[in-house]
Image (spheres, rainbow, N blue to C red):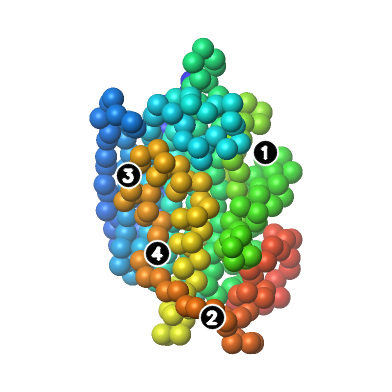
Amino acid sequence: METQAVRSYLLDLQQRIIAGLQAADGGEFISDGWQREPGGRLEGDGVSRLIEGGAVFERGGCNFSHVRGRVLPPSATQHRPELAGAPFEAMGVSLVIHPQNPFVPTVHMNVRMFAALPAGREPVVWFGGGMDLTPYYGFERDAQHFHRTCREALAPHGADLFPRFKTWCDEYFFLKHRNEPRGVGGVFFDDYAEGGFEAAFATMRSVGDAFLPAYLPIVERRQGYAYGERERDFQAYRRGRYVEFNLVFDRGTLFGLQSGGRTEAILMSMPPLVKWRYDWQPEEGSPEAKLYSDFLRPRDWADEPATHLWL
């Protein structure tokens, strides 16, 4: 099985992303390498890269992991029940960035490969991943740029992929108990093996390579915006939605916890400061209310003309 090429790509992607984020922040991501001893419930290795208290990024991490386990956890077999109980190999790069400035959106990106290794059968390999944007104060230009970059990245692999993966993202990153999207979406795909190993791997690479051009221009555009206690308070309130989604619905978080992964790395995605309020509602006509009315709903961002280009 051609896993070494996937591993090499993912390690290089992690390094390129860290270099880009460090240049934007001016600070350093710490590096925490780890290795699991053979013979345990889970074995493998990885590198966690983390920044806290940066000039731009309040907390952020970009992790690489490559693990092997005896039994696929339930979160990985809900769409493939025939593979329940099989040994597995998994590797990926996952990141979440929580900026300091409330006008800079939180972002998540993940690209991964899974291989189930059922006894007496050929390995079953699939890819997954995507990226999504979670603004606190919405800007049409930012959402349009993010979606258009995703569309351009997927275009070489078929014109149907972006609309499929966008819809998948809108449906996946949705808080059912709140009846609201987590953010403005992006792209998401899982259990993907169309065209065989090389074609599916190429699709995954295109998504990973698109992260920096999708996100860094937004950071550069918004990080100088002035903000105060009101904006930080709303940011902390909305971050609560992020925590709720990751702990209740996110398959990556559930997979990590169910498979016995490193808790610190798995929960790296959590924001540093969060608030919850009982039945809070934004003031009508406020910028906070506009997030709900204009941005927290599915829109065809990639095809929409900007109404405020100067923003």
Residue beneath disc 4: 271
| Separation (CA) of disc 2 from disc 1 | 44 Å
Could you tell me which residue is drawn at 62 percent across and 26 percent down?
Answer: 196
10 Å crowding of disc 3: few (<14), some (14-19), many (20+) = few
Q: Nearer the viewer, residue 29 or 164?
A: 164
Residue beneath disc 2: 280
Q: Disc 2 vs disc 1: which is toward the camera?
A: 2
Residue beneath disc 1: 157
Q: Disc 1 vs disc 4: which is toward the camera?
A: 4
Residue beneath disc 3: 262
* Quarter occupied by residue 69: top left
* Amino acid type indicated by mark 4: Pro
* N-terminal label among 2 and 4: 4
* N-terminal label among 1 and 4: 1
Could you tell me which residue is drawn at 54 percent across and 15 percent down?
Answer: 121
| Separation (CA) of disc 1 from disc 4 | 34 Å
Kind of element beneath mark 2: loop
Find residue 109 and report its horizontal and vertical position in percent: 50, 51
Kind of element beneath mark 1: helix
10 Å crowding of disc 2: few (<14), some (14-19), many (20+) = few
Find residue 43 and report its horizontal and vertical position in percent: 32, 31
* N-terminal label among 2 and 1: 1
Q: Nearer the viewer, residue 60 or 237?
A: 237
Q: Which mark is residue 105?
A: none
